[in-house]
Image (cartoon, rainbow, N blue to C red):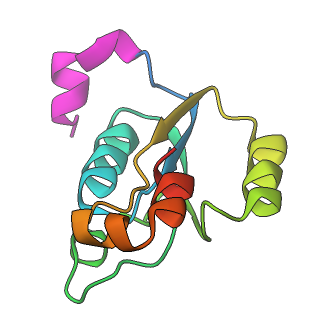
């Protein structure tokens, strides 16, 4: 049975078999993007911290199925650089973030390092 993506040919197959890195794939938006990319035929590598809540979309929707999921901190330059060197992504989506405004006031440096 063909999927909706195959029927509609979304994005003209642009992501099919592409190496795609999604940084922040365990968060709400990153999880949804990862699900779509997987459905579009991308070879997804996810890089993020573990989901911060239980329950969470990442676990409920089994986002980790069919992708490579690396649980690590984006601020770990050596690890992240190694992921780029090893997997050679053709497309990168940066969705890792520290989104809490009050926490950003308390720790602006860490917020900047994560978000930028």
* Image point (33%, 66%), residue name: 105
Magenta-colored segment: predominant secondary structure: helix
Residue 64 visible at all: yes
Q: Is residue 105 above or below residue 54?
A: above
Left or right of residue 57: residue 91: right
Judge whether 89 appears above or below 108 on screen.
above
The reply, left or right, for residue 92 in relation to residue 33 is: right
Residue 11, quarter of picture: top left
Q: Residue at x 40, y 47 (%)?
A: 95
Residue for point 51% across, 57% down: 114
Residue that lies at the very extreme toward the front in this rendered image: 105
Instruction: Note whether residue 62 is visible.
Output: no
28 or 16, which is in the foreground? Answer: 28
Query: Range of the magenta residues?
Result: 1-13
Magenta span includes 95: no
Expressed as whole percent of the image width and height from the top left, the position of residue 12 reads 33, 10
Q: Position of residue 37 (x, y in %)?
A: 37, 38
Q: Position of residue 21 (x, y in %)?
A: 56, 43
Q: Residue at x 47, y 57 (%)?
A: 66
Q: Nearer the viewer, residue 116 or 94?
A: 116
Q: Is residue 83 left or right of residue 9?
A: right
**Residue 10 belongs to magenta span:** yes
> In the displayed image of the protein, which residue is found farthest to the bottom?
54
Measured as percent of width and height from the top left, residue 79 is found at: 78, 62
| 17 sits to left or right of 10 | right
Q: Quadrant of residue 104?
A: bottom left
54 over 17 or under it: above or below: below
Tell me where residue 54 sits by quadrant. Answer: bottom left
Quadrant in which the N terminus appears: top left
């Amino acid at each position: 049975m063909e999927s909706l993506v195959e029927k509609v040919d979304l994005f003209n197959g642009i992501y099919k078999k592409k190496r795609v890195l999604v940084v922040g794939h365990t968060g709400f938006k990153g999880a949804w993007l990862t699900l779509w990319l997987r459905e579009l035929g991308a070879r997804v590598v996810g890089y993020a911290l573990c989901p911060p809540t239980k329950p969470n979309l990442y676990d409920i929707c089994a986002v980790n199925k069919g992708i490579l999921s690396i649980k690590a901190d984006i601020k770990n330059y050596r690890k992240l650089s190694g992921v780029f060197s090893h997997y050679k992504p053709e497309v990168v989506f940066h969705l890792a973030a520290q989104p809490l405004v009050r926490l950003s006031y308390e720790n602006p440096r860490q917020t900047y390092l994560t978000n930028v």
